Amino acid sequence: MKQQPIILSGLGSDLASIKSECGSRWQILVTRPVDQTQPDAVQALEIVNREATPVSTSIEFSGPITALWPTPEHGSVNAISKDLISGNYEASTLSITCNQ
């Protein structure tokens, strides 16, 4: 039986999967739908019943995310953003920690 693709609307164009000890153990980190002149944010989602469900608050960045990719171990995600004031690029490593 062929399943229909899941459509994730209202999200930015960058996403990366991440493995954690939380929830379903796999989350998707996604950016906001912003252009290159606005600050961006990253939020964790899980797919539950074919729906994208937020499972974290957003992490704000000082400019747009220009790249987002998982590390080879899938336990963290690398993000590159461009600071809108200085014009410098910044590298960040993101991971998920569960609330106890």
Image (tube, rainbow, N blue to C red):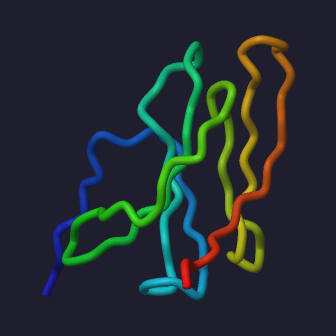
Q: Residue at horizontal 17%, vertical 77%?
A: 3
Picture coordinates of residue 27, whole percent (x, y): 49, 71
In-image side of 69 versus 58 (left or right)? right
Q: Residue furthest left?
A: 1
Q: Quadrant of the N terminus?
A: bottom left
Residue shown at 59% from the left, 24% from the top: 39
Quadrant in the rendering for residue 6: bottom left
Query: 49 or 56: which is nearer to us?
Result: 56
Residue 23, given in percent of the width and then of the height, sits at 44, 84
Which is nearer the eye, 29 or 59?
59
- From what the image shows, is residue 70 above or below residue 14? below
Quick one: quadrant of the C terminus? Answer: bottom right
Query: At 60% across and 71% down in the image, what residue appears?
Result: 18
Q: Is residue 97 above or below residue 24?
A: above
- Please indicate whether residue 14 sits to the left or right of residue 79 in the image: left
> 49 above or below 92?
below
- Residue sitting at x 68%, y 56%: 69
Residue 25 place in picture, x, y as percent = 51, 86
Total labels drawn: 0
Q: Nearer the viewer, residue 59 or 16?
A: 59
